[in-house]
Image: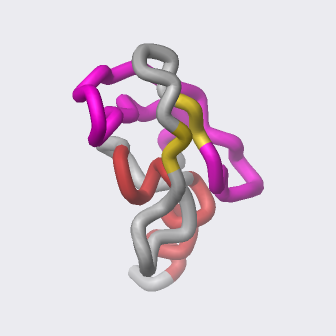
Amino acid sequence: MVTTTAILTCPVCGFAKEEIMPLNACQYLYRCTNCQTILRPKPGDCCVFCSYADTRCPPEQLKDEATR
């Protein structure tokens, strides 16, 4: 089952917020609602959720399920 929400934590200020993840796309940019920093994925990650959240994005979750 795919999880559609994640706690995204800003690496600059440490602010954490629950966000809804898009089901069919990776989110490349995210603006922290606390410090206004624009986050981009770390090298090798497809999106900000895979880099800074407690749950990988839905497309990556689906890839993981397909390889089981």
> Which residue is the extreme one toward the right?
24
In front of the other: 40 or 2: 40
Q: What is the image's colouring? A: secondary structure
In front of the other: 63 or 36: 36
Residue drawn at (69%, 42%), measured in percent from left and top? 22
Above/below status of 41 relative to 19? below
- State whether the magenta stretch is mostly helix, strand or loop: loop
Horizontal relation, residue 66 to residue 13: left or right: right
Question: Where's residue 60, x and y in %?
Answer: 52, 66
- Find out whether residue 7 is within the magenta segment: yes
Residue 25: name its quadrant: bottom right
Above/below status of 64 relative to 50? below
In front of the other: 51 or 58: 51
Above/below status of 67 relative to 9? below
Residue 38: name its quadrant: top right
- Find out whether residue 15 is within the magenta segment: yes
Question: Where's residue 3, x and y in %?
Answer: 49, 41
Horizontal relation, residue 17 to residue 48: left or right: left
Q: How many marks?
A: 0
Q: Which residues are magenta?
A: 3-29
Question: Where's residue 23, x and y in %?
Answer: 70, 47
